[in-house]
Amino acid sequence: MRVPYIPHTDADREEMLRTIGVEKIEDLFQVVPEKSKFPKLNLPPGRSETEVLTELMEMSEANADAPHYPIFLGAGAYYRYIPAVVDMVISRSEFYTAYTPYQPEISQGWLQAMFEYQSLVCDLTGMEAANISHYDGATALAEAVIMAMNVARYRRKKIVVSPTVHPQYRAVARTYTQGIEGVEFVGDDAPEFDPEALKSLLDKNTAALIVQNPDFLGEISSPKEMQDLADAAHAVGALFVVAVDPISLGLLKPPGDYGADIVTAEGQSMGNPMGFGGPYLGVFAFRKKYVHKSSGRIVGQTVDAEGRRGFVLTLTAREQHIRRERASSNICSNQALNALATAAYLATMGKQGLRQVAELSYHKAHELARAIDGLKGYSVVNKRPFFDEFVVKVPGGDVSALNRYLLDEYDIIGGYDLGRDYDHLKGHMLLCATEMTTADDMDALLAALDDYTREEVA
């Protein structure tokens, strides 16, 4: 018989009870009613581990998940291939259990991994510096707002935002800054992206101009359009902030090449699985001259007293480490394991692999859009070039009904209902295709959409 190790002896327990003035342990629970101390629990009979695992597996099969169902839902979270090496790397115990590297002499592996992540993010975005992440794409954008106001020493509190920046990102930015007196968000109440309208809102009180490229509707702005917006922002002393889909940068010019001061992104699509509630990854990169106004952590490379290369936390300007009033942000953690997954993903894919993923996504989305546009009752309404998402006007105008039909009748996860966020896009669906979208998936969707028109709308 195995006897559990209990460090306290009977004498130890008696001494502790005397110290607090009670005779026995049961006296500590006198405030609990007798009927509640040992209630009869309505539990099923015990089961073996194999039986429990079998039941849990059966329950999990009730989920409509991406590996089992064709999925055309994007809107900020994407079903993408994750190379096996990514999970192998992040599952190593020295990475999986690491948290805060307060002692760099024993955290060199973790610090170097995060330094490599920063370097890869800078290469991807064309920026000069990056921190080691925020909670997700939404908080990264909110931190960009705070950083822009920090750069302006809070003498500027006007934030000009494109209406095609992710609606949830805009909501989080407003929530994040609601305690800062005088913050004003303008521009995102317009019906569509209009560069000239955004420029007209810029003035000497503007801290930042924020756009998304590709935007929430999947549409791509040209480098010239982006450069013009950057120049207009800089002309009034504001920062130019660009939110991106990082996979698109396998094809598109990086924001650093057209004047961005801060680049943010949701990093989930780079090596992190989709999850209901996360965890996700907020990518955050910026110009080097603003490094002391940045939030989160930055790892730097140096040499020790013997000239050997080493890594340290160069900057942690957060309120845990410095006086609250001097902190650039109140963010108190980061997504290190998710950042490690992204570093492993980018290192594995390389430039050519990332380009191939972007090309596959682009071409599959366009192939699907052409086919849907040819169906009776459906029309693709994008006015600009798009990347891997596009907007479809659906027959009958009820996107939620169409999505229920796709799921119930065809086991297909449909698109995002744009009427939730844009009044003028009621009856419009945002559809997505990635490198994981197969020809069979597209054929199934096309057949289902056609059947919906004949059976439900006719």
Image (cartoon, rainbow, N blue to C red):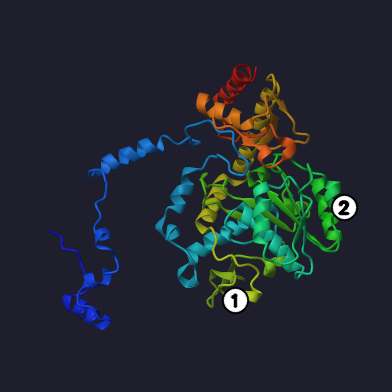
- SS state under label 1: loop
Position in image of residue 259 (x %, y %): 78, 55
Q: For the image shown, how many numbered marks are present on the structure?
A: 2
Q: Can residue 74 be seen here?
A: yes
**Could you tell me which quadrant the N terminus lies in?**
bottom left
10 Å neighbourhood of mark 2: few (<14), some, or many (≥20)? few
Residue 244 shown left or right of residue 436 in the figure: right
Position in image of residue 219 (x %, y %): 73, 39
Name above or below for residue 121 compared with residue 297: above
Name above or below for residue 255 compared with residue 452: below
- For marks 2 and 1, give the one nearer the viewer: 2
10 Å neighbourhood of mark 1: few (<14), some, or many (≥20)? few
Disc 2 target residue: 200
Name the residue type under label 1: Ile
Q: Residue furthest left?
A: 1
- Please tell me in which quadrant of the rendered image residue 73 appears: top right
Position in image of residue 415 (x %, y %): 61, 34
**Could you tell me which quadrant the C terminus lies in?**
top right
- SS state under label 2: helix
Which sits in the foreground, 207 or 123?
207
Disc 1 target residue: 322
Name the residue type under label 2: Ser
Residue 311 shown left or right of residue 15 in the figure: right
Indicate which disc residue 241 carries: none
Residue 232 shown left or right of residue 87 in the figure: right
Q: Badges 2 and 1: C-beta atoms under 8 Å apart? A: no
Position in image of residue 454 (x %, y %): 62, 16
- What residue sits 46% from the left and 48% below the top? 87
Distance in Å between CA atoms under marks 2 and 1: 39 Å
Name above or below for residue 397 compared with residue 249: above
